[in-house]
Image: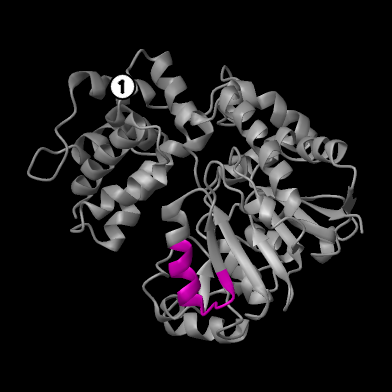
């Protein structure tokens, strides 16, 4: 594709994202599936343009409102280009009419570019919520959580995330995975905390390579790997992954169990569980089954007290994944958070029944908000005094702490929280 063609595609993709409440990555995946003529390099270029806008969406919207311009996809991309160092003339050259290029700039769009000339993305009149690219209502919660480190945490949260992989020890060692990826032209470095993790810089094509196709590596953020590590699943155990989704942590725990024992992946979504089955087969996992949680389901009641470990990776606000999903920041509402915290408590009250005496329940979220994390655990313990909080034993830098709190700034991972709760014998 020509640069003009990439720009036209970016305008179309951004228009679809702006018009839909669905996650941007899901919209982008469908967008590119419907346009298979767009090659890998062009997909990355188009995505870079769009995600550049999403990461600066509040800043860009502030400037457009200040200048009286509507926040159209074209205007957002024009503003982003200006703040990236382009000139009005250069931008006008990118908007070229033709079979694949976007229509030329209107007079209003030309004037917008001219008004933005000489300015920077940041302005003293912008509020802290705009500076940090978060909704106004959530800023006090983040300030309470991070205190004096808020600005640095938010800056790290707005940086692009690296690509983390987990080595599947059922298929080979970490050194063997590094060598296999190197043969594909991919340089991977061991992660800092996860014993199975590898990190690649930037967005790189992994899924079509032999290492991934053979099940030697899986895409999984290091923080997500550490949640599975906290479960301490071991050969011969009975383990329940109560909110399994597509099975990322199920895969990790099954690997720790060396295909010995029994693990059940539970979820409310048939498509997600179907995706988990495909991943389990590729990974060579044989000790896992799936269970669909449906309204009125009696499975948890029948299985009460039968599991050594239960993981509740609860549905949450996803605030810890904002560097991967910058669009989610502006879609999150106070009502969403209230509904999520109620749902988390409900799930915990059901899942705890599965834990045998002396067994452990690990509660986790990909959120950095206290409402979903420490406050949720404290409320659970008040309702269920037969459980107690067990300090962390790993990873080493967090040993002895009551909770696992991860963030991009602190550990280079997504934002995660986890607590380990033990049922009395």
Query: In this view of the protein, can residue 65 be seen by the observer?
Result: yes
User: Going by the picture, which residue comes out furthest to the left?
Assistant: 99
- Above or below, 224 against 283 in this view is above
Indicate left or right for 200 with 416 as reference. Answer: left
Residue 416 appears in the figure: no
Q: Considering only vertical position in the picture, is 400 above or below 330?
A: below
Placement of the N terminus among the 4 image quadrants: bottom left
The verdict on residue 77 being magenta is no
Q: Quadrant of residue 346?
A: top right
Residue 278 colored in magenta in the image: yes
Is 354 above or below relative to 139? below
What is the span of residues highlighted in magenta in the rendered image?
275-288
- Give the tally of numbered discs: 1
What's the residue at 62%, 80% (across, down)? Answer: 259
Q: Nearer the viewer, residue 37 or 279?
A: 279
Specify the quadrant of the image occupied by residue 165.
bottom right
Q: Residues within 10 Å of mark 1 (few under 14, many from 20)?
A: many
Image coordinates of residue 212 in percent, x first then y, are 45, 75
Instruction: Identify the residue at horizontal 33%, vertical 17% (top origin).
Output: 69
Q: Residue at x 43, y 79 (%)?
A: 185
Which sits in the foreground, 106 or 73?
A: 73
| Residue named by callout 1 | 112
Q: Quadrant of the C terminus?
A: bottom right
Report the coloring of the rendering. Answer: one colour
Q: Secondary structure at mark 1?
A: helix
Between 97 and 273, the one lying in front of the other is 273
In front here: 187 or 277?
Answer: 277
Magenta portion: prevailing SS class: helix
**Residue 364: x %, y % from top left:** 70, 50
Residue 348 lies in what quarter of the image?
Answer: top right
């Amino acid at each position: 594709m020509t640069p003009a063609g990439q720009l036209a595609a970016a305008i179309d993709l951004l228009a679809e994202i702006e018009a839909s409440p669905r996650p941007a990555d899901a919209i982008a995946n469908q967008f590119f599936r419907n346009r298979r003529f767009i090659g890998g390099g062009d997909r990355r270029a188009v995505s870079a343009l769009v995600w550049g806008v999403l990461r600066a969406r509040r800043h860009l919207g502030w400037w457009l409102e200040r200048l009286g311009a509507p926040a159209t996809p074209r205007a957002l991309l024009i503003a982003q280009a200006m703040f990236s160092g382009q000139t009005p003339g250069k931008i006008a050259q990118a908007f070229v009419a033709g079979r694949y290029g976007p229509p030329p700039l209107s007079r209003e769009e030309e004037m917008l570019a001219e008004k933005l000339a000489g300015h920077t993305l940041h302005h003293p009149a912008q509020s802290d919520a705009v500076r940090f690219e978060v909704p106004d209502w959530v800023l006090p919660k983040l300030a309470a959580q991070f205190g004096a480190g808020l600005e640095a945490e938010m800056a790290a949260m707005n940086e692009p995330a690296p690509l983390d992989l987990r080595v599947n020890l059922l298929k080979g060692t970490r050194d063997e995975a590094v060598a296999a990826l190197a043969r594909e032209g991919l340089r991977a470095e061991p992660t800092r905390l996860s014993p199975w993790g590898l990190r690649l810089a930037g967005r790189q094509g992994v899924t079509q390579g032999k290492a991934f196709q053979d099940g030697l590596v899986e895409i999984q953020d290091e923080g997500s790997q550490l949640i599975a590590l906290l479960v301490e699943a071991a050969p011969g155990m009975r383990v329940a992954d109560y909110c399994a989704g597509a099975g990322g942590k199920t895969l990790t725990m099954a690997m720790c169990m060396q295909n010995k024992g029994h693990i059940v992946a539970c979820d409310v979504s048939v498509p997600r569980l179907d995706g988990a089955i495909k991943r389990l087969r590729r990974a060579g996992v044989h000790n896992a089954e799936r269970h669909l949680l449906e309204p009125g389901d009696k499975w948890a009641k029948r299985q009460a007290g039968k599991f050594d470990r239960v993981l509740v990776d609860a549905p949450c606000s996803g605030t810890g994944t904002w560097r991967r999903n910058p669009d989610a920041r502006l879609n999150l509402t106070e009502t969403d958070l209230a509904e999520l915290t109620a749902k988390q408590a409900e799930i915990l009250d059901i899942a705890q029944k599965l834990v045998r005496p002396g067994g452990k329940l690990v509660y986790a979220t990909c959120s950095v908000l206290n409402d979903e994390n420490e406050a949720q655990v404290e409320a659970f313990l008040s309702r269920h005094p037969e459980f107690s909080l067990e300090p962390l034993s790993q990873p080493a830098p967090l040993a002895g702490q009551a909770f696992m709190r991860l963030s991009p700034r602190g550990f280079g991972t997504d934002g995660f929280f986890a607590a380990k709760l033990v049922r009395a014998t």
